Amino acid sequence: MSESIDSESVDSESGPESLPPCPRCGTPVANVTTVGPTAQYARPCGCRIPVGVFESSD
């Protein structure tokens, strides 16, 4: 069985001070990997996070 994987990266010019914290461990999140409709993982920490936690309401 194969799963679709999408990645959303923060602008490469952003420094660690501008990265949002992981809602589980507080580590700055540089990337969020979505695996399926209900699973997302923060990187570099690897914590599983709620889908949409970093989506803006703009």
Image: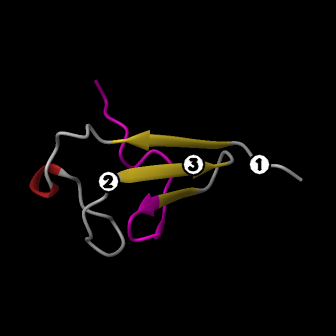
**The stretch drawn in magenta includes residue 33:** no
Q: Position of residue 23 (x, y in %)?
A: 33, 65
Q: Characterize the local packing of mark 2: few (<14), some (14-19) or many (20 or more) Cα atoms within 10 angstroms.
A: many
In the rendered image, the quadrant that contains the C terminus is: top left
- Location of mark 2 (residue): 30
Residue visible at 83% across and 49% down in the picture: 2
Instruction: Tell me how far mark 3 sits from mark 2, CA to CA.
Output: 14 Å
Q: Nearer the viewer, residue 53 or 35?
A: 35
In magenta, the rendered stretch is 42-58
Q: How is the image coloured?
A: secondary structure
* Mark 1 burial class by Cα count in 10 Å: few <14, some 14-19, many 20+: few
Q: Amino acid at mark 3?
A: Thr
Q: Which residue is mark 3?
A: 34
**Label 3 vs label 1: CA separation?**
10 Å
Given the image, on which type of amino acid does mark 1 rest? Answer: Glu
Q: Secondary structure at mark 3?
A: strand
The residue beneath circle 1 is: 3
